[in-house]
Amino acid sequence: MRALSRLSPGAFMIVTALVVGAFLIEAWMLVLRQPFAAYRDFSAARESLLAIERMTASQQEELRRESARNKDLAERLRAELHAPAPEEQLTVSIMRRLDQAAAGAGIKLTSLKPAGRRNVLSFEEISFEVGAQGGYLALCHWLLGFEALIGRSATVSEFTMKAVDEGRQVSLSLRLAVYRPLPNGASAP
């Protein structure tokens, strides 16, 4: 108190104004701190919900794409697994597809003949001997489209390529194995 009484009235007013100002600033901060914290919480929650909404929308789009892809694969598999029943029809169908693709690639099929059949698990394996002749690049191009041509239910089990006609032509022979499900899901003995 003595120190305050020694102060001039102007200095006392300045000190009083500073103390009251500091008190008002602290009171204002206390009053604003809670709403400001609530605003930050709401803003963070809003950003989080927006991120979840964007993620959910992208996941739904991805689910739609995957569903369409699965449907397409199921249709392709259904079409491939329902090959013509008699072996003669299957041979004719494969011969026609191979011949059309060979003509389109500029090569000539020299042979296509059945090479036997056997049961493998719950599938029937029908083998074919295929021979073709043409330019090296044309044969390679024809082979690149082989999966699209005969489907995924077939594989090449043997493959031989030789130069003929003094290296101007290439002769190709391969063994093609086509797999079909056994009737009524029967399995091989």
Image (cartoon, rainbow, N blue to C red):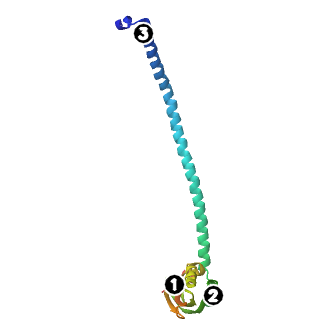
Callout in the foreground (2, 3):
3
Type of the residue with mark 1: Val
Where residue 127 appears, as percent x and y from the top left, is 53, 89
Type of the residue with mark 2: Asp
Does residue 69 appear left or right of residue 160 in this picture? Answer: right
Q: Are marks 1 and 3 in contact (CB under 8 Å)?
A: no
The answer, for residue 179, to whether it is visible in the render is: no
**Residue shown at 55% from the left, 52% from the top:** 55
- Give the camera-side residue of 157 and 56: 157
Residue bearing the label numbered 3: 11
Q: State the CA–CA distance, disc 1 to disc 3.
A: 103 Å
Q: Quadrant of the N terminus?
A: top left
Q: Earlier in the sequence, mark 2 or mark 1?
A: 2
Where residue 73 appears, as percent x and y from the top left, is 59, 71
Number of marks: 3
**Which mark is on residue 156?**
1
What is the crowding at mark 2: few (fewer than 14 residues within 10 Å), some, or many (at least 20)?
Answer: some
Q: Are marks 2 and 3 in contact (CB under 8 Å)?
A: no
Residue bearing the label numbered 2: 99
Residue 65: quarter of image: bottom right
